[in-house]
Image (spheres, rainbow, N blue to C red):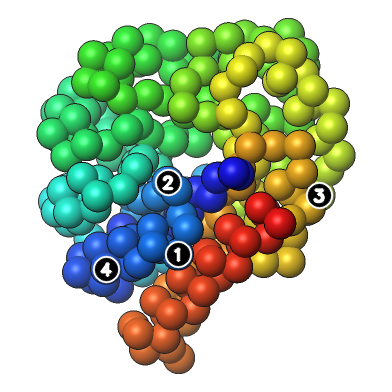
Amino acid sequence: MKKLVGFITASLPSNNFTVDLALSMKEAGVDTLELGIPFSDPVADGPVIEKASLTALQNGFKLKDLFEVTSQIAPNMDTLWMGYMNPFFHYGLEKFLALGQEYGIQGSIIPDLPHEESEPYKELFARYEQTVIDFVAPTDSFERIKAITQNSQKFIYMVAYAGITGSGASEDLTEVVENIRTSTSTPIYLGFGVDEKTAKEKAKNVDGVIVGSAFVKHLIDDSLSNNEKMKRITQIASNIKDQINS
């Protein structure tokens, strides 16, 4: 069965809502949660996730909020942190990872930590029973794909197109996927631009999909009540899980 990874922004609109939403998404078919760490300069994210991140910060988000929601979510579902290196360094990377281990975090997705720079940190992550998820882009050569994926763990984040999340661009990834398969047996999950309209097509030839903006756009919709946000997001999750496995 193909897997569904779902991204939500931590503590938006509140810690309690984040916990309830995450566990409801699990019931709706989300296999792994990406718990987004709000940051002021999310360079890889499109306008939807960027707005969510900035709204959470304006609402007073602090890292203690991340740890509070993580402590309630990670023991109950497969959970990754998704964030930029600045918060990890600012708090203290080893302290961050120690808390991740305590709460049951499986690893982190760090968009501004390229493969060449991630290698020195992977041993530290492993010491705390966590992994750094590797990215492969459509522009990567076969040689670079082999270098990136030879020691990859959990899954490979296949970027669907060059650009930012949520823009809906499309590229032919057949050759890239074949190159990854030649280099590793680690599952390939495709992210960027996956929603209810595109999920079935984008799931072809890969082992799962990663969905972010399609969920988060409802988190930042002020016309919806919290109950409506949760219903819409969980319904989308259920629909996408059905589509990628039909």
| Crowd class of label 1 (few under 14; some 14 to 19; many from 20; radius 10 Å) | some
Going from N to C along the chain, the mark reached first, 1 or 4, is 4
Q: Which picture quadrant has residue 198?
A: bottom right
Nearest-to-viewer mark from 3 and 2: 2
Residue 222 vs 3, above or below: the answer is below
Q: Do the residues labelled 4 and 2 touch (CB within 8 Å)?
A: no
Q: Which of marks 1 and 2 is in front?
A: 1
| Secondary element at tag 1 | helix
* Dot 3 amino acid type: Ser
Under tag 4, what secondary structure? helix
Residue type at mark 4: give it: Asp
Query: Which residue position holds label 3?
Result: 170
219 vs 58, nearest the viewer: 219
Q: In 3D space, how far apart are the residues under numbered discs 3 and 2 (Cα atoms)?
A: 24 Å
- Picture coordinates of residue 170, whole percent (x, y): 81, 49
> Is any part of residue 82 visible from this angle?
yes
Residue at 27 percent across and 68 percent down: it is: 20
Instruction: Estimate the spatial distance between the alpha carbons at disc 4 and disc 2, rounded to whole Å.
Output: 15 Å
Give the quadrant of the N terminus.
top right
Point out the frontmost of discs 1 and 3: 1
Residue 15 image position (x, y, % from top left): 21, 65
Relative to 9, residue 119 above or below: above
Image quarter for residue 211? bottom right
Residue under numbered circle 4? 20
Is tag 1's residue or tag 3's residue first in the polypeptide sequence?
1
Q: Which residue is under mark 1?
A: 28
- The residue carrying mark 2 is 32
Residue 84 locus on image (x, y percent): 40, 39
Q: Do the residues labelled 4 and 3 touch (CB within 8 Å)?
A: no
Residue at point 37%, 89% (across, down): 225
